[in-house]
Amino acid sequence: MSTPRFAGKVVAVTGGGAGIGRTYAHRFAAEGADIVIADVNLGAADRVVKELAADGHRALAIEMNVTDAGEVADMVAATVATLGGIDILINNAGIHLEHAQLAFTTEALPAWRNVLDVNVLGALTCAVACRPAIAARGGGAIINMSSMAAYGNGSAYAVSKLALNSLTVGLAEEFASDGIRVNGIAPGLVDSESAMAWLNDPSRAAIGPMLINGQMIRRQGRMADLANACLFLCSEEAGFITGQTLLVDGGFTKKPF
């Protein structure tokens, strides 16, 4: 029987209490990893940890806001003390598109700052805090969750995701000496709870079919598609890949109109 790909590894997933983060947690655990669910919603994090424990996996729930450097540092310390270290960080926490289509006005600036604080500086805060722990294990991987929205016109959400793509390149260069690879994943339309809730608004009834018809692969993306990409980028098979943001969008952004 072969050893699971991530046996002995510790994976920290921010925003892991639901949706894509929860899917990542289950997939990494199924391939042998210990899991940390760091989420602003401790109840949601606890539920995922209980799901993992019921399947025989070791997991830890931590209440954490990615914009609070102290809470992030505490998460790292608790993970090292409980699970022995960190090998992989998944920067999945973020403010969804639904809450980040903001006006270009002075009045909207505080909301803009909040989106950028969470989606960009939150990822930076977590990466910087986790770096020593990952380096101490001989290196590892960081994944930043971007979006295909970064490649089009848009408001605060798109701006934050394009900035995150640039941050991915900068972190990859900065962390390479510690054996840490940094990559991003830019999803298209997938069946996450947040995306489906947004699309199920009657005023947006035409958006889902429009996006699918604009893809080369004419189906809705699945969270499993993102998990497949994430596990690959964190595996030894991707050991020569860093600084990249992988579009997992069915070809939407590359399809000529």
Image (cartoon, rainbow, N blue to C red):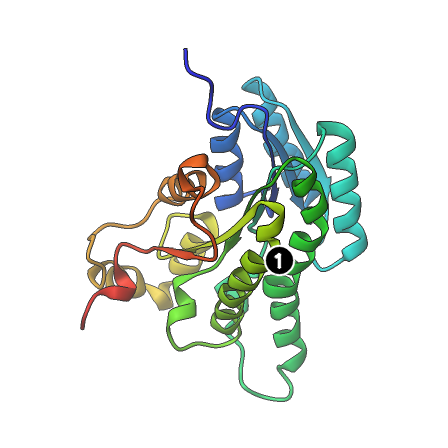
Residue 65 image offset from top left, x and y in percent: 71, 53
Q: Residue at x 72, y 40 (%)?
A: 62
> How would you rate the neighbour count of disc 1 (Cα within 10 Å): few for under 14, some for 14-19, many for 20 or more?
many
In this rendered view, identify the residue nearer to me: 53 or 88: 88
Q: Is residue 206 above or below residue 250?
A: below
Residue type at numbered disc 1: Ala
Instruction: Give the residue at mark 1.
Output: 123
Residue 132 image offset from top left, x and y in percent: 72, 45
Q: Residue at x 75, y 43 (%)?
A: 75
Task: Pick the quarter of the image with the C terminus.
Answer: bottom left
Q: Residue at x 71, y 28 (%)?
A: 83
The residue tagged with tag 1: helix, strand or loop? helix
Q: From the viewer's perspective, tell me whether residue 203 is left or right of residue 15.
A: left
- Which residue sits furthest bottom? 106
- Which residue sits furthest front? 177
Q: From the viewer's perspective, tell me whether residue 136 is left or right of residue 210.
A: right
Q: Residue at x 79, y 40 (%)?
A: 77
Question: How many numbered circles are shown?
Answer: 1
Task: Pick the quarter of the image with the N terminus.
Answer: top left
> In which quarter of the view is residue 232 placed?
top left
Residue 199 image offset from top left, x and y in percent: 38, 59
Q: From the viewer's perspective, tell me whether residue 254 is left or right of residue 226.
A: left
Residue 183 image offset from top left, x and y in percent: 48, 53
